[in-house]
Amino acid sequence: MSRFNRRVQIPDLQLPKYDDAEEEGDYSDNYGVARLTTTGSNVSDDQEPVVGVKVLRQASRHRDIKGDYLDVPSHSYLMKIFQKQGDKQVLFADKVLKFTASGKMKHRILLITDFALYIIDPETNALKRRIALAAVEKTCLSDLSDNFLAIIIPKEYDLLMASTRKTEIVAVLVEATKSASDFELEVVFSNR
């Protein structure tokens, strides 16, 4: 028997009740398939909304937050880049996917310090962009469980990224802008 033709038998499961279950009748006529019905909100009773709107994914709930996922002090080229600009503390460092205006994806390193955002090319170890935290107007997230994050900079072009740690990025940006400029960064949830 090949490993691709294995069959696993799952015992009968007790199916949970979903919205309007009484109106739809018993689940026995659905051949063991549960049907979900949509509600007006995307937040159920056992989920915690982020900023009252978006639901955290299960993996994001109990994640350890390190901030510096690249161990910046061990990379001399990263230390030189942000110390040359006069920044003192790295609040967040991780690899992200940056989307260009033409739709191409580029691997980048995102550094958030106490005064600025840095976008660094990991292949050439070159600084591609420095954005002062005071220049950031807002961050945009979708209502969906995805990894996309847009940072809106009115005086320059905006930044669209994808990261598995976007919740942490937004939290760090909000705290950093609050402490650097007494301005609270606006977080917008939209599917546009």
Image: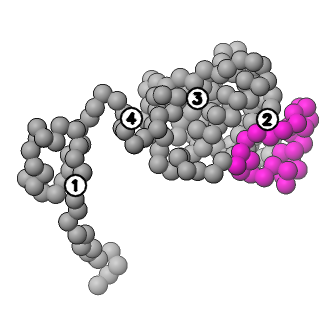
**Crowding at label 4, few (<14), some or many (≥20) Cα neighbours within 10 Å?**
some
Label 2, label 4: how far apart the Cα atoms are? 33 Å
- Magenta-colored stretch includes residue 84: yes
**Crowding at label 1, few (<14), some or many (≥20) Cα neighbours within 10 Å?**
few
Residue drawn at the location 83% of the way across and 45% of the way down = 78
Location of the C terminus by quadrant is: top left
User: Mark 1 belongs to which amino acid?
Assistant: Leu
Q: Is residue 192 left or right of residue 175?
A: left
Residue holding disc 2: 113
User: Mark 4 belongs to which amino acid?
Assistant: Val
Q: Earlier in the sequence, mark 1 or mark 2?
A: 1
Of 54 and 7, the residue lying toward us: 54
| Quarter of the figure with residue 87 | top right
Label 3, label 1: how far apart the Cα atoms are? 39 Å
Secondary structure, mark 3, is strand
**Bounds of the magenta span?**
66-92
Q: Earlier in the sequence, mark 3 or mark 2?
A: 2
Residue holding disc 4: 43
**Crowding at label 2, few (<14), some or many (≥20) Cα neighbours within 10 Å?**
many
Secondary structure, mark 2, is strand
Residue drawn at the location 79% of the way across and 35% of the way down = 113
Residue holding disc 3: 150
Residue holding disc 1: 15
- State the image coordinates of residue 169 (x, y, percent, origin top left): 64, 37
In the rendered view, would you say 90 is above or below 62? above
> Which of the labelled discs sits on residue 88, or is there none?
none
Residue drawn at the location 27% of the way across and 73% of the way down = 8
Q: Are marks 3 and 2 in contact (CB under 8 Å)?
A: no
User: Mark 2 belongs to which amino acid?
Assistant: Thr
